[in-house]
Amino acid sequence: MQDNSMKFLQIAMKYFPEAQQQLNQAGVELSMEMIQPLMTLFTKVMNEAYELGKEEALANEK
């Protein structure tokens, strides 16, 4: 799971500038310090989504 967590974080960081720009336009300031708790939550969500997809893929193989 650790390897997937790193991949999920890399994906999130890829889109961070776009998210930051959109939030700034909405008047919400976002910094790396503020985003850390959200990244932890994002990683949990992505791990659960990955496991669900994996279960579905294995079920469809049968």
Image: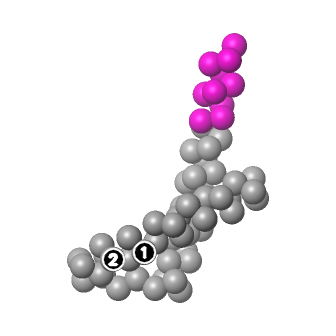
User: Which residue is nearer to you in this view: 14 or 19?
Assistant: 14
When the figure is inspected, residue 61 is found, relative to residue 27, above or below; the finding is: above
When the figure is inspected, residue 31 is found, relative to residue 44, above or below; the finding is: below
On the image, the x and y values in percent for residue 62 come to 69, 13
Q: Could you tell me if the residues under marks 2 and 1 are in contact, i.e. CB atoms within 8 Å?
A: yes
On the image, the x and y values in percent for residue 30 come to 40, 82
Say whether residue 21 is left or right of residue 2: left
Mostly what secondary structure, the magenta segment?
Answer: helix
> Which stretch appears magenta?
53-62
Residue drawn at the location 38% of the way across and 77% of the way down: 20
Say whether residue 35 is left or right of residue 10: left
Q: Is residue 19 magenta?
A: no
- Circle 2: element type: helix
Q: Residue furthest left?
A: 26
Residue denoted by label 2: 21
Q: Quadrant of residue 28?
A: bottom left
Residue denoted by label 1: 17
Q: Amino acid at mark 1?
A: Pro
How many numbered tags mark residues here?
2
Residue drawn at the location 75% of the way across and 57% of the way down: 3
Q: Residues within 10 Å of mark 2 (few under 14, many from 20)?
A: some
Q: Is residue 59 magenta?
A: yes
On the image, the x and y values in percent for residue 44 come to 60, 57
The chosen color scheme is one colour
Residue drawn at the location 30% of the way across and 73% of the way down: 22
Q: Amino acid at mark 2?
A: Gln
